[in-house]
Amino acid sequence: MAKLVGRPIGSRRGRDVPRIELLVVQPTPFCNIDCRYCYLPDRSSKAVVSRQTLHNLFSQVFASGWVGECLSVVWHAGEPTVLPIEFYREAFRMVDRLKPAELAVSHSFQTNGTLIDEAWCTFFREERLGVGVSIDGPKQFHDRRRLTRSGHGTFDRTIAGIRLLRRHGVPFHVISVLSAASMAVPREMFDFYVEEGIEQVCFNVEESEGDHVSESFQESGIESAYYRFLSEFWRLSAAAPGHITFIREIEHAIAQVIRPADAPFRNQLVEPFAVTSMDWAGNISTFSPELLGLKNPVYEDFILGNINRDALIDLPSRPNFIRMLADIEAGVEMCRERCQYFSVCGGGEPVNKLAENSSFASSETTYCRLIKMRGTDLVLDALERVQSRGAVGKGAVCAEVYE
Ligand code: SF4
């Protein structure tokens, strides 16, 4: 296997001023469907974030000095399209009024797609919203886990939403949670995306998070199955140019593996407040967004304060934040010392370490073996074959998969 390049990650810049890059806002915890692997504990609650809470969040974020030239806002952690379009129009205008003139703010939705109609498509296009739709591949895979509250599959409604997006020319990507069954049939998965005109795909594997224990992680041979799937999917995509234009797992792995030797690499998920999350009630958390709604016997919860009562800039001095940070940093140090993939990973995802190892102060997980290690191996293997012939660069690595 080719060797990993890139400067090993230095000490965390966490005691510098935080830099918020991604703001995850829960407009409502409610979801109109009931996926079997959902980690959101309050997805039956129809609570909605108030205007005042949004005002307090954005005005504090913009006044904090913690944002740079751009800020991404993801409306997620519940199904965003259960709220009326007007809710978002007003919220976006409020953000525009509050933000510094030079700051670029981009909004995006992660949606199950079942409620997308003509009006949503018009809104998405007008607002240039980033849209991610969750669909797990063809109906027989999607309908196993993505169900209504009465237990019926949601594929037909989700694919109808995707077809509407395409008809209206709304750019979108999909996120597909892979199962052992779908990993076994990369050709079938590839054909599905091509037939539906889906060009940008992101793959997840069902994770253990909170109280949810992944069934996929119990499967023997899951790592080699994931490697084979990704490898074949990449090969199929490269062999039929113009259909699948973006495979997140491959693009990210290539970007990390083939980078200048002195290029820094950062892992947002272990940097305080780089990813900042707020629930509908104004509670604030950081690191992995999934932590916001979770309870834990050691930490109780991961809420650092409430934007309606507390000053955002005071949250780094909270005892529970200091404890989380110390444990997460200890975990990153373990990764740095033990893991040959550290230079392309940066210490993984705190929520997975907690779920699988019962501690932030830990290193390897099944999740990181799949997503980080096997994805990196795939690119390194292609790079090694390319280098053995004296070629270099991303184009050569991509061309390699034809062979
Ligand atoms: S791949 Fe896993 S063990 Fe290695 S640095 Fe990342 S989280 Fe740590």
Image: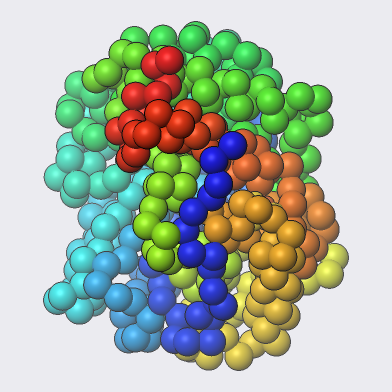
In the image, 111: left or right of 94? right
Residue 222 vertical position relative to residue 101 in the rendered view, above or below: above
Q: Residue at point 24% right, 35% down?
A: 171
- Residue 126 location, quadrant: top left
Percent x, y of residue 291? 64, 61
Q: Position of residue 39 (x, y in %)?
A: 66, 46
Quadrant location, ligand no. 1 = bottom right
Left or right, 43 with respect to 388, comes to right
In the image, residue 214 above or below residue 291:
above
Give how far across and how far down residue 365 sits, in percent.
74, 48
Figure check: 49 above or below 166: below
Residue occupying image coordinates x 56% and y 78%: 11
Q: Is residue 139 visible?
A: yes
Total residue callouts: 0
Point out the image quarter for the C terminus: top left
In the displayed structure image, the side of residue 248 where residue 42 appears, left or right: right
Where residue 206 sits in the image (x, y, percent)? 65, 35
Residue at left offset 60%, top offset 17%: 182
Residue 60 versus residue 136 in the image, above or below: below
- Front residue of 201/63: it is 201
The image's colouring method is rainbow
